[in-house]
Amino acid sequence: MAAGKTIGDCTVCQIGDVPDIFGGKYPGEMRFLTGPLAAEQVALTYRRMPAGSGGKGSYGHRHKSQEEIYLVLSGRVEFKLDDEVVDVGPLSAVRVAPQAVRSIWNEGPEEAVILIASTTIEDVMSDVEKVEDFWPAP
């Protein structure tokens, strides 16, 4: 994991210096900034989604305890939240309760950039429940 630059009690990192957890397996990129920033309370994730990418035709997920807030910085995306699909544009925020099953899709035509905020937890994967076949492809 790339480390940020420490300045007194503060940390600075460049998104491009943080590893992409997709590692080329999926379109776009997802970068967990919490560790490189040495954040103790706030989890922050950067996600870039090319047109035609995301969770449609795939799984969704929910959390046992972690609430998430998605901030769409650019582009448009669709959120499937339980049984509803919501279209969200730039500079819109979506709060998702832990128990709500969610997935996100970028229909396009532009790329979308999203920032996801939540609380830090020691073992995030133990908090996630994957829901197969959540958003079937048309």
Image (cartoon, rainbow, N blue to C red):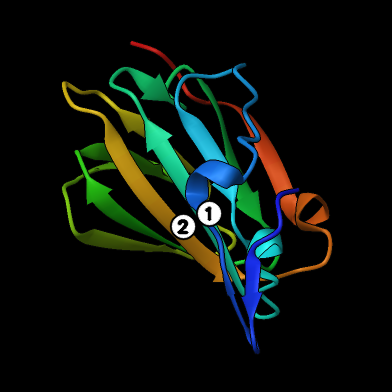
Q: Which residue is located at x 54 percent, y 39 percent?
A: 30
Q: Which residue is located at x 28 percent, y 52 percent?
A: 72
Numbered mark located on residue 116 in the image = 2
Residue 3 place in picture, x, y as percent:
71, 58
Give the alpha-carbon distance from disc 1 to disc 2, as whole Å: 5 Å
Give the amino acid at mark 2: Ile
- Classify the position of the C terminus by image quarter: top left
Q: State yes or no: discs 1 and 2 in contact (Cβ < 8 Å).
A: yes
Report crowding for label 1: few under 14, some 14 to 19, many 20 or more residues within 10 A (C-alpha): some
The relative height of residue 46 versus residue 9 in the rendered view (above or below) is: above
Element assignment for label 2: strand
What residue did someone put label 1 on? 45
Give the amino acid at mark 1: Thr
Residue 30 can be seen in this image: yes
Residue 16 place in picture, x, y as percent:
51, 42
Q: Locate residue 84 relative to residue 24 in the image: left or right.
A: left
The relative height of residue 137 versus residue 44 in the rendered view (above or below) is: above
Q: Nearer the viewer, residue 45 or 79?
A: 45
Q: Locate residue 25 relative to residue 100 in the image: left or right.
A: right
Q: Nearer the viewer, residue 78 or 4?
A: 4
Q: Locate residue 132 relative to residue 58 in the image: left or right.
A: right
